[in-house]
Amino acid sequence: MSVVLVINSGSSSLKYSLMDMEREVPLGEGLIERIGQENSDISHTVRRVASAGEPAPTVLDTTERSQRPIADHDEAMKVMLEQFSEHGPQLAEHPPVAVGHRVVHGGARFFAPTLIDDLIEINIEDLSVLAPLHNPGAVAGIRAGRRSFADVPHIAIFDTAFHQTLPPAAYTYAIERKVAARHRIRRYGFHGTSHKYVSEQAAAFLDRPVDELKQLVFHLGNGASVTAIDGGRSVETSMGMTPLEGLVMGTRSGDIDPAVVLHLGRVAQMTTREIDTLLNKQSGMLGLAGRIDMRDILAGVEAGEAAATLAFDVYIHRLRAYAGAYIAQLGGVDVVSFTAGVGENAARVRAEAMSTLGFLGVEIDPARNDRRAPGIRRISTDSSSVEVLVVPTDEELEIARQTLSLA
């Protein structure tokens, strides 16, 4: 059995998954949150896939939850090992052949799965200047992981890597060239692991070669992005130098006139840190409606709340704008896929986002769209000229696949 341990380390969290790569299913997974705070939350789930013929669900989950102080990522890694030891699966019985680490920002340096050594670790840390909210946590997880699993290769999988195929016209900002080069200012794109996985799953579902398809993938969660994919290659994506650009998100503003930042500094006398906090943590749906969860927003819309209605309208307006722009860049589209928490579960978001594309022959089947079902499913009509799908993403599996390809 080939087993890969996937680590997704944030500034104050450690998410992990032990993947059986023969069946491509998780054996166990967990999340440690609020690292460094007074009390950290620990959740560990053991999974058992039912044997053939068993009158049981496909996956049987047992979840253990607890709290305790966890000072740093080294201690979090020890807690993860304790969870496997106490609750299973036993790592001695399922030893990982490699550890895959999710890294948000790879800059222009990293465009493929990369074997981590001391120099690579330094390079990832150096890129923290481009992703100060994300890369420092990844580095902490990498260091803790390399100490805990010193005898197996550690592979970095970069969210930005899939977007390294963007043409210069797509990734170049129109600012003075020397300034941009000196400070590494360009569009990098994010959610690449998800966009790659979803586009390949969509092609497999349709039984068509991925290199023959023009695709749009909407990754709609608390963070949100859309990518235009031509023949399996990312050619345009909504997030930019950081994950702040693009669509309206849970707490991020998405696209905004850069002069707003200057205005807030001049007129409101806000500091750079305050503006950073405003745009990344206090804007988006939270800023417009006081809520992040799309279910709460939709409930407010149904209740006739003006703030929720405006927030939803702004959200949909941005989705439609990007859909139209990216279809124009592609010169047409064969497949549109929705994924992540909102994309997979909010039928009204999908319907509204696609409602103005009838001139392209896009037809949504209301019954299919409203029906909840596991796995990939078609929500367009049989006569629609564009396939519209819901494709559950699995970033941990994609990270594990890419890790195993290099291990």
Image (cartoon, rainbow, N blue to C red):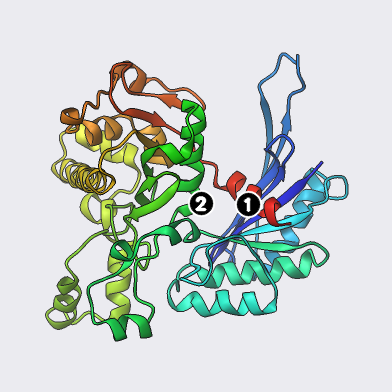
Q: Residues within 10 Å of mark 1 (few under 14, many from 20)?
A: some
Q: Is residue 356 above or below residue 135?
A: above
Q: Is residue 319 left or right of residue 370?
A: left
- Which of the image's four quarters has the C terminus? bottom right
Q: Residue at x 78, y 55 (%)?
A: 82
Label disc, if present, on residue 371 of the rendered structure: none
Determine the secondary structure under disc 2. Answer: helix
Q: Nearer the viewer, residue 360 or 26?
A: 360
- Asked if the residues shown at circle 1 and circle 2 are in contact, with their CB atoms under 8 angstroms apart, the answer is yes
- Quadrant in which residue 125 is drawn: bottom right
Q: Nearer the viewer, residue 126 or 231?
A: 231
Determine the secondary structure under disc 1. Answer: helix
Q: Is residue 93 left or right of residue 120?
A: right
For marks 1 and 2 on the same chain, the one whose residue lies earlier in the sequence: 2
Q: Position of residue 302 (x, y in %)?
A: 21, 30
Judging by the rendered image, the residue that carries numbered circle 1 is 402
Q: Is residue 174 above or below residue 294?
A: below
Q: Position of residue 286 (x, y in %)?
A: 28, 53
Question: Gap in Å between the C-alphas at discs 1 and 2?
Answer: 10 Å
Q: Residues within 10 Å of mark 2 (few under 14, many from 20)?
A: many
Judging by the rendered image, the residue that carries numbered circle 2 is 193
Q: Residue at x 59, y 65 (%)?
A: 35
Q: Is residue 284 visible?
A: yes
Q: Residue at x 34, y 64 (%)?
A: 240
Amino acid type at mark 1? Gln
Q: Nearer the viewer, residue 399 or 292?
A: 399
Amino acid type at mark 2? Thr
- Which of the image's four quarters has the N terminus? top right
Q: Nearer the viewer, residue 4 or 308?
A: 4
Q: Residue at x 68, y 52 (%)?
A: 405
Q: Is residue 273 left or right of residue 16?
A: left
